[in-house]
Each structure stands twice: as structure tokens, then as C-alpha cells.
Image (spheres, rainbow, N blue to C red):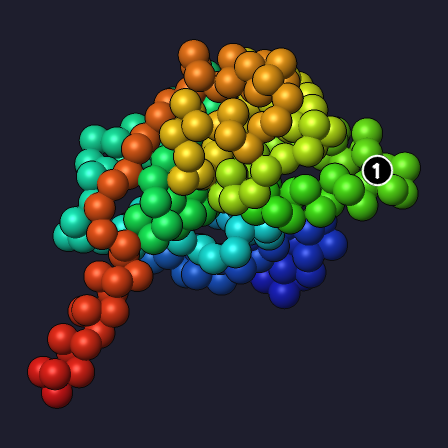
Amino acid sequence: MSEVQVKGLMATLKLAGMAAVLEKTVTAAQADSWSYTEFVDVLLQSEADHREERKSKNRIKASKLRIEASFEDFDFTANRSITKAQVKELYTLKWVTQGRPLLLIGQTGVGKTFIAQATGLHACQNGKSVLFMSVSTWLESVSLARSTGGYLKFRDKLTKPDILILDDFGMRKFSSLEAQDLCEILEERQMAKSTLITTQLPLEHWQEVLPDPVIADAILDRVMHSAVQIKITGESYRKVKAKKLDSKKEEK
């Protein structure tokens, strides 16, 4: 069978990873006198790598992350309280394996959303499913789902990902029904799936936006005792970035 025929058969069998490296692999095998086992190993590994890369891209697309933020792009020179040890803790994803919630707490501009999205991207690249949405988008979606009779289906969608990221909790007060919806999601995900929440509000102030004290206590109980909490203080990174841009302009 010719190389062209082999490529055609690989395409039919949907072995795109193998087909992409076949010519190069044949050349290398002939030049270095590879054994049949070595030759097959390289082709199989190429196919496995190709499929994992495709799955990773699909997970990233499904995650609805707004930007492909990366830990490698995180600026440790900015005057913020988060440490390399804390970032490393996020990077290990051990908290995901344990099904623990993660709270990123800090004022506007300190990088909570960037860190949340970097965590989500890293998780996608390491085989975890992720869903990102702002709390305002979630509340709008819940309202729409209820009005169209699709609430249970929407709630099930939020319980499936390994990590659910809810960005900007506490920007407005919840109604009792909205607070109940949040409580149900946290309950469904408790001890099995991780929920990452970014917020300006320390836990002791959550009751200010959760009007029903019984539901508020239930929500706090589901996150307070098991959550990894990272409190971030410091100057707004947007302000720091603006200063750096101004400095570059002056240098020119």
C-alpha cells in the first residue's frame, strides 16, 4: 500500500493525528532504522496528542471563558497581596479533585476575574470541564429558564461541569427566589464539583445581599467550612497597567 493510500485510509478512519505526521515519521524511521514497534509508537502517540488537543479546545470553547487568560501572563510585580504559593495552590487543581469551593475576594481591579479565567483555562487544558458566567448573566438566564419552563434543565447544566465559575457575586441584592436558586446549585455541587466565586464581599457580609436569613445561612454553610479562600488586596491592576503604559510613552 502506498503512502498516499495509507493517508487516505487514515482519513477514512478519522486518524488525523497520524496522517499529519505520517510522511515525517516514515522519513525518520528510514533514516534511523526504527523498529516496527518504535514506528507504531510514534504514530499512536501523535494520534493521542492530537485527540487530547482537540478535546482541550472543545472544553475551552464550551467553558464560555471571555479571554484566554493564563497564569504565565500573571503580573507578580503588581502590588497585590496574592502570593506565588497561593497561585501554585490554584494551579495544582487539588481543590477541584476534593470538590471544594474557591472564593476569590477583593476590591474591583485586583485581578479576581483574570485569576478565575486563568484557573478555568488551566483546568480545561488538564481534562476538567468548566463553565464561566457572571452572576448577572446567571440571574438573567435563571429568570428566562423559569419563564420558559426550562429551569430544571438549566440547573442540571450548571451541576455538570467540574468547575462552575460565578463572577462578581454581590453586585446587587438577590430576591428570595434567586437566593434559593443559588442554594440549590451549591447543594447539587457540594462535595463533588467545585464552584469558584469572585466577589468584593467577605463572607461575613454576604447576608447583606441575601435577604432571607434562613437561605443565607444555608448558602454560607455550604461554602464557609470547606472553601479555599484567597483574599486579594492592593492597588487596582488597571491603574498599575495605565501607569506602565504612560511610562512607556514618556520613554519614547
Vertical side of 244 occupied by 210: above or below: above
Q: At x 20% / y 39%, what residue is drawn?
A: 81
Left or right relative to 165: residue 112: left
Above or below 61: residue 168: above
Q: Position of residue 39 (x, y in %)?
A: 45, 44
Residue 39 in sight in this render: no
- Quadrant for the C terminus, please: bottom left
**Which residue is at 25% across, 69% downward?**
242
- Across and down, in percent, residue 171 comes to 52, 44
Seen from this angle, which residue lies furthest right?
149
- Mark 1 closeness class: few <14, some 14–19, many ≥20 residues within 10 Å: few
Q: Tell me: 129 left or right of 204.
A: right
Q: Amino acid at mark 1?
A: Arg
- Determine which quarter of the picture holds residue 237: bottom left
Residue sitting at the far bottom: 252
Q: Which quadrant holds the N terminus?
A: bottom right
Label 1 sits on residue = 146
Q: Residue 174 placed where, x, y %?
A: 63, 35
| Nearer to the camera, 174 or 235 | 174
Instruction: Quadrant for residue 228, please give it.
Output: top left
Residue 94 sits in quarter: top left
> 228 or 143: which is nearer to us?
143
Where is residue 38 drawn, in percent x and y?
A: 41, 40
Look at the image and tell me whether residue 78 can be seen.
Answer: yes
Query: What kind of element bears circle 1?
Result: helix
* Closer-to-camera residue (79/12): 79
